[in-house]
Amino acid sequence: MYVLGMFPYPSGDGLHVGHVRIYTAVDVMARYFRMKSFDPSTRSTRSGLLQARVLAPMGWDAFGLPAENAAIKNKTIPQEIVPKNYNNFREQMKALSFSFDWEREFATTDPTYYGLTQWIFLELYKKGLVYREQVPINWCPKCKTGLANEEVLPDGTHERCGTATGKKDLPQWVMKITKYADRLLSDLDMDLGEDFDKGLSFDSPQLAQDSQATRSLDWPRGILEMQRNWIGKKEGVRLFHKVEGMDLQLDAFSAYPIWCFADTFMVIAPEHPLVKELVKGSEYESSVTKFIEESAQITAEQRTEEKFEKKGVFTGRYTNDPFNPGSRLPVWVANFAVMGFGTGIIRCSAHDPRDYEFAQKYNIQLKEVVERIDPLVPVNAHTNEGVLKDSGPFTGSKISSQTIEEVKEWIEDQKIGRRETTYHLRDWVFSRQRYWGEPIPLVHCKTCGVQALPEKDLPLELPDLKSYEPTDTGESPLSRVTEWVKTTCPKCGEEARRETDTMPNWAGSCWYHLAFAFWKNANRQDGEKSTHDVLEVYRKSQSDTPYTDFWREVARPAIDKYLPVDWYLGGAEHAVLHLLYARFWNKVLYDLGHLSFTEPYLRLRSVGMVLAPDGRKMSKSWGNVINPDDVVKQYGSDPVRLYEMFMGPWDQVTAWDSRALVGMRRFLERVQKAYEDSPLDQETSPLLLQKLAKLVAHIERGIVEQKFNTCIAGCMEFVNEWKNGSLVLSREHMGNFAQIMCPFAPKTAQKLWEIAGHDSSSKVEALGWPQIEVKEGEIGLPVVYAVQINGKLRAVVEVASEVARDKEQVLKQVRASQTVAKWLVGEPKRTIFVAGKLVNFVLV
């Protein structure tokens, strides 16, 4: 079992309460799964925790812009501020009783770690997935570095610093993520098979059913949709057009080719490389050039927003219209056309609301090929419905998938275009013109060209610089370090220069989840060698491929043991960036034979933001930031943990309320007093035993479904019924309640365990998850039946205990279930009944 929280950037001086909400949930789940997988033979003598049957590690995403900008702001160097920050993070986490495996801790700035990052980069490079190209990139004038499209927000600002971005032509290292576009899209819905079930063992039939409901990625629908939209696959046709009076062809992409008979004009993106050629030397050159400059100040995302004002200028040019011989299409430059979609050139008609609005504004003639339903507006082509008119050989045809296919065939037969698939996804601009990042392990030789650094020369370490501010030229600060830049070519031995751009902060986080599986740091107490020491042995060997050997012999076996990640918890802001990049690298490593699985994270859960008490985002400038150190000091770690889990549904936004925190402390105090006041020599009240059994099941399900607030509410309700109803809880069952409190409030749980008269040398978290013994039917507990259709679990049905073994009554209640009725088509040929457990309807 592998439970992982997205590791933090140590760019600030401490965690905030939003971090705490994520990591408390991770710790609750890790503690629960450890207790569920209890095996006395695996108990650790060092800490009282179970050995690593459940992996819950922690590390630091320490390279990149956030850390470097923080160092610049504090007038220090990253090498000083980053360790200082993550050391404080660690102490904060320990103060909150987070049970992470600190012997696996690492920072991405550790040369041992980023040597492996560089090795992975070279694996992609050798596979032909990395290339260098002069490209117009997003440029942040404040950070003075290039940005990937994914790092620019819809309003045109840098997602890190909030500065408005522009464009700049620079030679960049780019990764061919588009080569994996189809797989990145289709694998969102792939059947993960046994990987999905790895590490999961549910006692509850209902949970078992839920786990079988889908074996594709169990991610929030919104995030899956964001990934699909960002990849943006569209199937359609590329259409050819000759520009009148010029030896120039304009290719337009259309995802709705059956509507092309309605097109009456074309628009081209302002940034399209052919625009200036279209108007060069003409009377339209000045107005078009001005429009291009104005459009460059606005992002593609802004320009394509539905409410954004559509603007354009005429180029004075026309093309032929291959769909309507003898007709010509005027060519406009329009701000709603962007190079990131299709070819950057669009055929336009009355049947697209955006095109219609633009044509109305500039008095462009329109034509409709489907009769209107609403007399005020044309039919929208996106509906792909209607009967065609004035559409050449397809006039009178009803629009259908077959007709659309016939139109595509006709286009290819007429040689006026070809089928094509386009993507919104663009190749990943990978290099950064900054200091604080992994050096790119490539050298430039005048004779041999670009050469990869041999594995035995890794890691290529980042030199220590006191002055590392970015330059205005677009070159990395490393370009100024002559003694580091100057090197020899690994192929010919002649003088060469190192690549001076660095990797983006996403590089280290693309594979960190893999590293935790095999990482051993120098703080281990078991005497085993650290990963650094083991890798050094490989580096000093005679092998030319020490990193490949290490991966095959050391890393891969450990990765196969734990991966893929079973539960991945973090912020929704990583929906496109980190998650897409990590999936890409994972698939490449799989193709290279370095991994046995294609998807890194089986289950993803996104936390809701924690707002300030005033309902605004927490900000130092507003003075409304809640420091977890302060609240832990005032209330204690367990009340803070409880409140973080109780403040509302975990995946929804909520505002901090210190009054509720007071309530958590009072609840724990009340529980402790209840224990202190209870006799230890009495039997549990039957009704309370029933409640306790239900509570255990409720919490099991609540933790797995991240309904942490309902788990705590259930504990509160149980304590109320216990004390207000003058009921009795035995010493054994008081211990059980301490066990179920352990994932949420471990310190209090241990105290309760000891107050109940149990061995103080035993750690409650190392004693397993409670199993409450209740005789079936004795106190009215319903009996849960697993219902199968042809041997496959389709539903679970609760049957009242008094009729739980009456076959006729059980079948009657089972058949009354709507879920069962949906699957039960016709009368079964045979019914298998196992009293108290199972009903199986055999239909075939």
Image: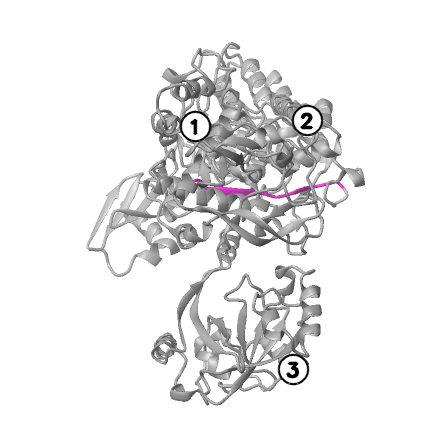
- Crowd around label 2: few <14 · some 14–19 · many ≥20 (10 Å): many
Say which residue label 2 marks. Answer: 81
Q: Earlier in the sequence, mark 1 or mark 3?
A: 3
Is residue 566 visible in this depiction of the protein? no
What residue sits right under mark 3 in the picture?
360
Label located before the other in sequence (2 or 3)? 2
Can residue 636 be seen from the camera position used here? yes
Q: Which residue is drawn at 71% across and 65% down?
A: 294
Image coordinates of residue 447 in percent, x first then y, are: 46, 41
* First in sequence: mark 1 vs mark 2: 2
Circle 1 is placed at which residue position? 517
Q: What residue type is labelled 3?
A: Gln
- Cα–Cα gap, marks 1 and 2: 27 Å
| Bounds of the magenta segment | 599-613
**10 Å crowding of disc 1: few (<14), some (14-19), many (20+):** many
Q: Which amino acid does label 2 sit on?
A: Ile
Q: Which of 73 and 231 is in front in this view?
A: 73
